Image (spheres, rainbow, N blue to C red):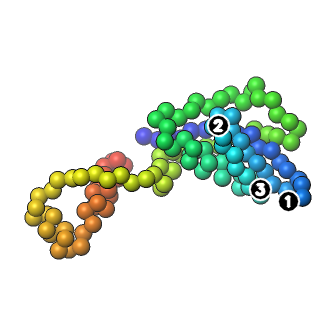
Amino acid sequence: MEKRLVYPIIVKKYNDEDGQYFVATSPNIKGMVTQGDTLSDVVYYAEDAIATMISDYKDYPEPQDPADWKLSVDETVVFVSVDMAKWLKKYSKTVRKNITIPEYLNEWAKDNNVNVSKVTADALKELQEA
């Protein structure tokens, strides 16, 4: 199942003693702030920041309609696409699971240096993708 979400973010352009850079916030994701040297950078970092902040949610926050947002002249709305399935596949934590296998397979796996956890995870990934 694809879990692609699209969230609007507010990007503000700064020109100060630190040079030119962009800062992104999201009214949808409380506390989400990230920055980048270019607009492309800040959008890239915003995707990761959003995914990181909502990865533990059972239900992802509903994207707000930015039409009513009050923006200053140096702010703009940018829509960020977040592929949660891809992000979780890459960054999700591992969990310990006890499995039961026949003793002869356990002995064979030990004798042949087979990582049973990896084989199991790979098999489950194949099943998921089928």
Which residue of the protein is positioned furthest toward the top in this rendering?
68
In three-dimensional space, the C-alpha distance between marks 2 and 1, rounded to whole angstroms, equals 26 Å
Q: Residue 101, position in %: x, y?
A: 15, 56
Whole-number angstrom distance, CA of label 3 to CA of label 2: 23 Å
Report the residue marked by disc 1.
18
User: Foreground: 57 or 74?
Assistant: 57
- At 17% from the left edge and 53% from the top edge, which residue is drawn? 100
Question: From the viewer's perspective, is 36 left or right of 62?
Answer: right
Indicate the amino acid at tag 2: Lys
From the viewer's perspective, tell me whether residue 65 is left or right of residue 125. Answer: right
Query: What's the distance in space between the residues labelled 3 and 1, CA to CA?
Result: 13 Å
Say which element carries label 3.
Answer: loop
Q: In this view, does 67 lie to the left or right of 90?
A: right
In contact (CB < 8 Å): disc 3 and disc 2: no
SS of the residue at dot 2?
Answer: loop
Mark 3 or 1: in front is 1
Q: Name the residue under label 3.
A: 38
Question: What amino acid is labelled 1 in the image?
Answer: Asp
Q: Can residue 43 be seen in this view?
A: no
